[in-house]
Amino acid sequence: MKILLVGASGTLGRAIHQALSHHDVITAGRASGDLRVDITDSDSIARLFEKTGRLDAIVSAAGETHFGPLTETTAADFRIGLENKLLGQINLALTGQHYLNDGGSITLTSGIVGAHPIRHGSNTTTVNRALEGFAAAAALELARGQRINVVSPNVLQESMAAYAPYFPGFEAVPAARAALAYVRSVEGIANGQTLAVW
């Protein structure tokens, strides 16, 4: 399969790349990878797909959200997650569907905070739930046997040192285990699903 992996340089992205290494993987990111893309810019996304050409799968492990106390969060803060992780990944799907071969798949990334909110994570919870809702609805309309899913990983063991204060009592998962859900989404038959790795 010819697969586009956006966000390949992050901890999760590197694990996904390794798990899908038996395929032809094209990596893309804002500052690294085979190709460059800014997922907050629709023109940048369009240029990305013009360079990739036809694909069998699109995988996104990209996107930023805002973390901070709700009482101090502004509309501008909240737009960080809406314009980056949410609309950025949705725009990848909206544009990417037209470059996807028959039976191809799109896999986006949400996270456990969508189902289990944490302190200072209202922006992330909102974005993750919206992504999961988008995939459930989009799966009903994609053409030519195309599929779309969302992977919802727990906090990663490799990132726990930095994020531990936000995730008290959460059981972190290895990035390699989370990456298996992306393999399942790409190579399996799931459609419109949220694949939780908790």
Image (cartoon, rainbow, N blue to C red):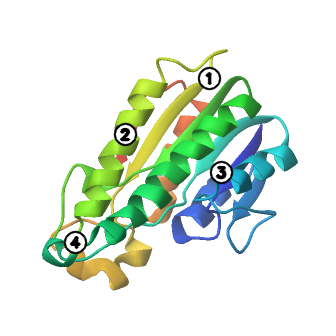
* Closer to the eye: label 4 or 3: 3
Amino acid marked by disc 3: Ser
Amino acid marked by disc 1: Gln
Report how far apart the C-alphas of labels 1 and 2 lie in the structure: 17 Å
In the rendered structure, find residue 132 and report the number of the disc placed on it. 2
Residue 84 placement (x, y as % from top left): 49, 60
Dot 2 or dot 3, earlier in sequence: 3
Q: Please give the name of the residue rendered at 22% of the width and 82% of the height, measured from the top-left corner.
A: 165
Dot 4 or dot 1, earlier in sequence: 1
* Closer to the eye: label 1 or 3: 3
Q: Quarter-wise, where is residue 144 in the image?
A: top right
Dot 1 or dot 2, earlier in sequence: 2
- State if disc 2 and disc 4 touch (CB < 8 Å): no
Q: Is residue 120 above or below residue 56?
A: below
Report how far apart the C-alphas of labels 4 and 3 lie in the structure: 33 Å
* Closer to the eye: label 2 or 3: 3
In terms of secondary structure, where does tag 1 sit?
loop
Residue 195 appears anywhere in the view: no
In terms of secondary structure, where does tag 2 sit?
helix
Dot 4 or dot 3, earlier in sequence: 3
